[in-house]
Structure formats: structure tokens, C-alpha cells
Image (cartoon, helix red, strand yellow):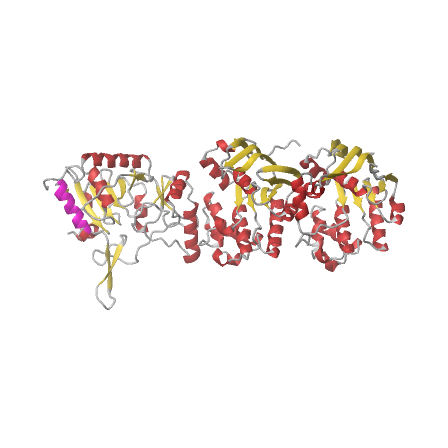
């Protein structure tokens, strides 16, 4: 652990402030809580929100896993994992089953999470209606009054124009049948995992300065119509490496003649199946 | 007359700085009746409409609304959530410029269906059916339900706004110069539509207009305003054929006969 | 039996645009209408016949007096001007055929008459035909009709409602002899079903044919 830094980089008062926001978020599932987002040693858009949440809940006995688009070995995942190793000295891992805290960008691990785990999502835009309603004051009012008509109008328009809802990631959900929430840019395929997850789910948006949360075993429903029910989509292929037919796949272009292969996005899951 | 008034306003007063917008104004509205508020620019008629609809708060006065169950509500003491809920279900507001009320980048069907979806409708097929039916009722070809309103004419936009407002069968609709700015032939069509829909659905309407002919056609009762005060009120034909107040006499005599 | 009883009606017009000049027209006028009978309002032009008729209908406000109408099994006074009461009385009890048809754009002649008959298009069509409005005109808005045709649409609308009290203001003014006779027939039928009528007729022959009593309105003599 590097000298000169408080445990997990943030000072204790900041952590308290963030924890208070987290507690509020847990008390009101899906509701966005403003917080005093701090200057972090990386720019906005690189996970500052997620890092602050992780830093606030991290303890010396925790085991941390960090993934980016499902992979432990991309640049960002590696950097953030190393950041916490240096500033907190905690054990890190790539195995989902071994982690107590998982910070993620844009995916939920394939391996089901447990009650003793916490998953922290990096969120770019916490407001699910940001593209429908430019005024933040108005979206605040809409959340307060549970007036979500425009969001259903957007889904209606998609079905009218494309025959199906055209949102394939960051698909809006109703949390606890009360708040409309952005689950962060995870693929729509991952949305069902949010519903009644045994683990605590925390969401941090550093640039927008919002924290929200879903307590364990909370009902989370993806928006749909009765006659156009929500359908998670994945590529119709099996993983070229491990043969999995149910996991979310990345499409990898292997040469410049258009050859491509599909592999599990979740690297740990794929390796586990291959017995590595 | 044992029926109770749906909306009762009394003593309404509102100042915009030195300007008196409303001065001791009282108005009553019964279920199913059309009331016209007539006056020239600066008369306070639009301000009165906005105050009655709860969009603007008066300095003084009281407004009471009776819901279908007979319960009385003090509108000025009502919180924003309750007022917004009222506007979503029982009430409607037709704006003078339909572009202010419609979502111009949402299809016609989506615009009509929005209030249904806001009220909890979750079946795509039925929402579409109801929207198509309403478009036909306001004489817009249902085949255009997936078109964007940006491609519609002024008269069509106004009819679309009316469909969008009436789709949830409100009991009370506020209309602010619904035919303002439209060509005469377009106006005629719109007025006929409003007349038939209102009569058929038994909707109570508070209608603001500067056009006496519109008031005569649509309203059973009318209120004449001048400089923030109500100068005359009564049966539409009586006020227009036997005006008592000097200002009303001036207004009526000023109308050009075709 | 009596269906309408107006007593002590007073009305003056105050023309604010002409310096507030006051023109008295009705000065203590009484008028009673009996079921099955037609009362003709007579008097020179400008005496106040039309004013009286409009006052009875509620289109003109009276300054004094009472207008009692037998409505829903009780006497109600509509002189007070409660607008909703007047509208209800007009819907159910008191009908009026004015001199001019107020033309509504886009509404066809048939619709105008049917609206007054609870939407009964068959009856409306029959009455229009009886008043010699040919079928080809039924679907057209009356805006382009001749004065006589418009008046006949007006008459159809007025008579089809079956009101117990019917006020007729110059109903035959723009009609030829044939249609005049139709109107006389309609009046007779109305009387037969028990309606109480009041009418202003400039045509002596029609007056003779329908009058059961005459109420003469004398013009108010101007102060010297």
C-alpha cells in the first residue's frame, strides 16, 4: 500500500458523506441521491463515480474484482484494480465467486451473485429520461410524481418504427414499482439479473454527481407492453472458446477478410468453463 | 336546480406589479355546460383561464372543484401532485398554439396515446386502436397515425391536440382561443368538431375567445371581461342580443356582419 | 289550462353608445297562453311585439315583472334570468321560431332539424319534405338557401321539438301561399296536441286562420 494516501484514497469524512448517500439510496430503491463528487485521479467518464462508491464501502478484508465490458484484463479494469491495490492494499481477484466487491463497467457477471457480495456499477448518465426531457428540473418533478408517460411513449414509438423496442443497452427499468431507473449501459440481456438479486447493487455517477442503489431481493422490471414483452437478446451463437450457449457474447473480428468469432464477454466465466 | 356546480370561483384578484389582471372575479361552471369568457386583449380572460386551471396562483380568492363523487376540493390549497393528477385524468387543457401542447417529434398516434399510457395503459395494440379511433373522430385519416405532426397543417395540429386531450374522457376542458390563427374554413370545421364532441361526451368547457361568433356557436352562457373585471354575465344569446353594460354594447356593435 | 303567464313586464333599452338614451318598450304588459290555443300579438310596427316575444323566451332581459311557465309539473319564473333554468325550460318546454335562421357552417339542414328531434332523422326528413324542402337540399348546410328555404328549415326545427309552449315570430314572412298553408296546418296540429302558442303574423289571412285570441301591444307614447 502506497504511503501518503488514506485507505482507499478518499479521506474518512468524504467516505462518510458517500456512505450517507448510499444509505439514502438503499432506503429509496432506484431514487437518485445527489452527492459531493470529489476530484479523482482520472477524468470524468472513466469511472470516477464507481471508484468513489467502491472506496467508500471497501474494507481491509474485502476482495475486489474489477471488470470492464465483462473483461478483467482491459486497460481500465487493470488500472482501477491496481489503484485500489496501491491505496488500500486489499486482495484483488479475477474470479467472480471469490470477490466480495465487484466494480463493473457495462456488464453484470454471468455467475450469479450472492448475499455477501456487493456490485458497484459505473454510470455515465443516471437520468433515464435524459434524452426525452432536457430539463433536469422537469425530470425531477416527473420522478417525484411518478409521471413516466413520456418513457412509455418512447417505447411505443420504437415499436411503431422498428417493430420492437430499439434500446439494446441501458434499458430503463422500474425499481420496486416506484422509480424509473437507468441500470447503466449494461446490455438489455443483463436486465433480468437485476431483478431480486441477492447482492447489494450500488450505482455511482461521478460527473453527474448521483448515487443510487437497489437493496437485495428488490423487484426490478424492464419496461414493456403486455403484447410486446421485454425480450433479452444475444447473438445466436455459442462461445467459440467454451461453447456456452446462454452467456452474453462479444463479436471479435479476427482478420481483414470479415472472419469473426463470438466469445463470452465475461472472461472469468469463460475461463471457468474451460477449467483454467 | 339541485345539481351542484362543478367549479366555483369567487373574489379572484391578481396583480402583475402595477397592472390589475383580475379584480374581484367570480365564475361558476356546471357539469356539461360550455361557458365562454369573452373580452379583448388585456381584458384578463386568459389570466382567468389560467387561474381557474390552477396554472397561475391568484393573490386573493377561492376556487372550489367538485369531483364526480361530489367531494369538494379547495383548488388553491391543493398540492402540486394532486393538481397534476387532476390535469392528467379529469381535466384537459387545449392551448391556443397546438405546437406548445404536442410532442412534435412523436408520431400522431403516440401523441394521442400518451395520456392513456400515463394513466397506466400497457397494451400496445389497444392503445393503437383507441388512438386510431380518436384520430378518425377528429377527422384525421388514421393512416397518418405514424406520421410526425411536423407534417400536419395548422388545423390538423389543433384537431390532434383535441384528440390528445379528450382521449381520457375528461369532465372539464379549458380551451384557450382554440380557433385562433386558423383560416376561416378551417375554423368552421374545428368549431363543428368541438361542438359535436362536447355535446356527445357531456364535457364541461371553459372557453376563452375574443371572437363573439365562436362564443355564440359553442357556449350556453358567457362572461364578458374588461380590464380584469367581469362586466356582464348570462345566457349567451341574451348577452349578445340585449347587452346591458356599455362595454358589452360596444363589443357587440363592433362585430362586422358578413 | 294555462301554460304561460307573464305579468307586469317592463323593459327599456338603454343605449350607452348613444349617450345613454333610454327607450322604454314594455310598460306593465301581461300575457297569458292557454293550452291548445294561439294568441296573436298585434299592434303597429315598433310597438314591442317582437320585444315581448324575445322577453318571454329569455333572449331579452326584463326590468320588471314575472314570466311564469308551467315546467316539469310546477310553475317556474324565468324572468329572474337564472341562465341554467332558462336553458332547461327552453330544452323541454318553451320553443321559439325566430324570423331568421342562424346559420351554422357545415351543419346540414337535416342535421339542424334532427338535432331538435333527439336525432330522429326520419321525422326530420318527413317534416322538411312537408315544408317543401326537396331531398337534394337535406344534406346541404342552409347557408346558400334562399330566405324562404332558410325560414322553412327554421320552422321545421321549431315545430319538430313538440314543445308545450311555442313562440312564433313572423313564421310566414318569406313564404308563398302553399307553404303558408303548411304552416297553418302545423299550427293546428300543435294546438291539437295541447301546445300553447303565441305568434306575430303580418299576414292577415294567416292571422285569421290561427288566432284564438289577440293581445294588442300599444306603443308607449313618448313624453311630450
- Number of numbered discs overlaid on the protein picture: 0
At 28% from the left and 48% from the top, the residue drawn is A124
The foreground one among B40 and A122 is B40
Residue segment shown in magenta: A76-88
Indicate whether A145 appears above or below A186.
Answer: above
Quadrant including the C terminus of chain C? top right
Quarter of the rendering containing residue B25: top right
Indicate whether B232 appears above or below C125.
Answer: above
At 42% from the left and 39% from the top, the residue drawn is A145
The x, y position of residue A129, in whole percent, is: 37, 47
Query: Is residue A84 highlighted in magenta?
Result: yes
The foreground one among A124 and A168 is A124
Query: Is residue B69 highlighted in magenta?
Result: no
- Left or right relative to B27: residue A147: left
Residue C167 in view: yes
Q: Main secondary structure of the magenta part?
A: helix
The foreground one among B246 and A78 is B246
The x, y position of residue B3, in whole percent, is: 63, 33
Quarter of the rendering containing residue C19: top right
The x, y position of residue C221, in whole percent, is: 84, 38
The x, y position of residue A26, in whole percent, is: 30, 36
Quarter of the rendering containing residue B227: top right
Amino acid at each position: 500500500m502506497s504511503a501518503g494516501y488514506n485507505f482507499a484514497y478518499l479521506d474518512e469524512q468524504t467516505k462518510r458523506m458517500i456512505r450517507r448517500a448510499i444509505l439514502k439510496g438503499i432506503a429509496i430503491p432506484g431514487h437518485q441521491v445527489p452527492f459531493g463528487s470529489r476530484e479523482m485521479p482520472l477524468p470524468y467518464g472513466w469511472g470516477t463515480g464507481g471508484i468513489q462508491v467502491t472506496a467508500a464501502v471497501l474494507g481491509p478484508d474485502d476482495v475486489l474484482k474489477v471488470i470492464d465490458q465483462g473483461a478483467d484484463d482491459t486497460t481500465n479494469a487493470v488500472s482501477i484494480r491496481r489503484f485500489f491495490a496501491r491505496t488500500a492494499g486489499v486482495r484483488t481477484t479475477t474470479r467472480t465467486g471469490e470477490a466480495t466487491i465487484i466494480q463493473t463497467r457495462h456488464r453484470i457477471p454471468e455467475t450469479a451473485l450472492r448475499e455477501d457480495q456487493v456490485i458497484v456499477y459505473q454510470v455515465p448518465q443516471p437520468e433515464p429520461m435524459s434524452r426525452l426531457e432536457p430539463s433536469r428540473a422537469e425530470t425531477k418533478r416527473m420522478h417525484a410524481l411518478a409521471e413516466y408517460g413520456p418513457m412509455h411513449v418512447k417505447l411505443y414509438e420504437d415499436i411503431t418504427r422498428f417493430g420492437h423496442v430499439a434500446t439494446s443497452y441501458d434499458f430503463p427499468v422500474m425499481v420496486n414499482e416506484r422509480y424509473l431507473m437507468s441500470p447503466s449501459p449494461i446490455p438489455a440481456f443483463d436486465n433480468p439479473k437485476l431483478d431480486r438479486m441477492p447482492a447489494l447493487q450500488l450505482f455511482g455517477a461521478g460527473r453527474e454527481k448521483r448515487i443510487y442503489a437497489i437493496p437485495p431481493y428488490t423487484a426490478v422490471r424492464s419496461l414493456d407492453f403486455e403484447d410486446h414483452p421485454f425480450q433479452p437478446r444475444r447473438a445466436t451463437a455459442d462461445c467459440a472458446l467454451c461453447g456456452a450457449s446462454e452467456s452474453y457474447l462479444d463479436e471479435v473480428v479476427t482478420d481483414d477478410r470479415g472472419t469473426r468469432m463470438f466469445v463470452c464477454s465475461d472472461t472469468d466465466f469463460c475461463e471457468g468453463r474451460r477449467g483454467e | 336546480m339541485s345539481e351542484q356546480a362543478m367549479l366555483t370561483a369567487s373574489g379572484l384578484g391578481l396583480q402583475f406589479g402595477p397592472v390589475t389582471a383580475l379584480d374581484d372575479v367570480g365564475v361558476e361552471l356546471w357539469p356539461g355546460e360550455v361557458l365562454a369568457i369573452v373580452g379583448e386583449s388585456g381584458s384578463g380572460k386568459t389570466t382567468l383561464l389560467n387561474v381557474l386551471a390552477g396554472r397561475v396562483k391568484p393573490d386573493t380568492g377561492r376556487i372550489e372543484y367538485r369531483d364526480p363523487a361530489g367531494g369538494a376540493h379547495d383548488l388553491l390549497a391543493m398540492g402540486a401532485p394532486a393538481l397534476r393528477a387532476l390535469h392528467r385524468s379529469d381535466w384537459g387543457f387545449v392551448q391556443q398554439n397546438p405546437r406548445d401542447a404536442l410532442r412534435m417529434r412523436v408520431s400522431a398516434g403516440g401523441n394521442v396515446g400518451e395520456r392513456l399510457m400515463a394513466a397506466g395503459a400497457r397494451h400496445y395494440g389497444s392503445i393503437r386502436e383507441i388512438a386510431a379511433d380518436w384520430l378518425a373522430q377528429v377527422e384525421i385519416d388514421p393512416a397518418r397515425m405514424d406520421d410526425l405532426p411536423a407534417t400536419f397543417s395548422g388545423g390538423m395540429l389543433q384537431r390532434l391536440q383535441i384528440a390528445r386531450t379528450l382521449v381520457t374522457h375528461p369532465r372539464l376542458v379549458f380551451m384557450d382561443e382554440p380557433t385562433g390563427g386558423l383560416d376561416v374554413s378551417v375554423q368552421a370545421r374545428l368549431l363543428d368538431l368541438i361542438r359535436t364532441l362536447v355535446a356527445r361526451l357531456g364535457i364541461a368547457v371553459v372557453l376563452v375567445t375574443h371572437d363573439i361568433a365562436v362564443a355564440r356557436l359553442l357556449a350556453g352562457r358567457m362572461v364578458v371581461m374588461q380590464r380584469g373585471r367581469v362586466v356582464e354575465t348570462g345566457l349567451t344569446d341574451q348577452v349578445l342580443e340585449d347587452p346591458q353594460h356599455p362595454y358589452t354594447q360596444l363589443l357587440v356593435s363592433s362585430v362586422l356582419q358578413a | 289550462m294555462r301554460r304561460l303567464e307573464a305579468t307586469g313586464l317592463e323593459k327599456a333599452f338603454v343605449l350607452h353608445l348613444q349617450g345613454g338614451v333610454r327607450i322604454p318598450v314594455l310598460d306593465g304588459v301581461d300575457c297569458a297562453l292557454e293550452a291548445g290555443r294561439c294568441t296573436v300579438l298585434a299592434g303597429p310596427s315598433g310597438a314591442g311585439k317582437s320585444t315581448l316575444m324575445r322577453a318571454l323566451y329569455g333572449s331579452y332581459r326584463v326590468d320588471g315583472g314575472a314570466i311564469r311557465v308551467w315546467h316539469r309539473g310546477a310553475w317556474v319564473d324565468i324572468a329572474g334570468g337564472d341562465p341554467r333554468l332558462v336553458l332547461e325550460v327552453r330544452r323541454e318546454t318553451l320553443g321559439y321560431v325566430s324570423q331568421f335562421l342562424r346559420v351554422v357552417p357545415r351543419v346540414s339542414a337535416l342535421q339542424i332539424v334532427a338535432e331538435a328531434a333527439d336525432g330522429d332523422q326520419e321525422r326530420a326528413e318527413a317534416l322538411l319534405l312537408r315544408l317543401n324542402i326537396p331531398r337534394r337540399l337535406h344534406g346541404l348546410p342552409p347557408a346558400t338557401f334562399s330566405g324562404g328555404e332558410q325560414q322553412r328549415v327554421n320552422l321545421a326545427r321549431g315545430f319538430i321539438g313538440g314543445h308545450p309552449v311555442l313562440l312564433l315570430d313572423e313564421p310566414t314572412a318569406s313564404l308563398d301561399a302553399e307553404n303558408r298553408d303548411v304552416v297553418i296546418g302545423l299550427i293546428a296540429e300543435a294546438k291539437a296536441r295541447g301546445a300553447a302558442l303565441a305568434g306575430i303574423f303580418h299576414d292577415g289571412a294567416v292571422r285569421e286562420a290561427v288566432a284564438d285570441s289577440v293581445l294588442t301591444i300599444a306603443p308607449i307614447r313618448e313624453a311630450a
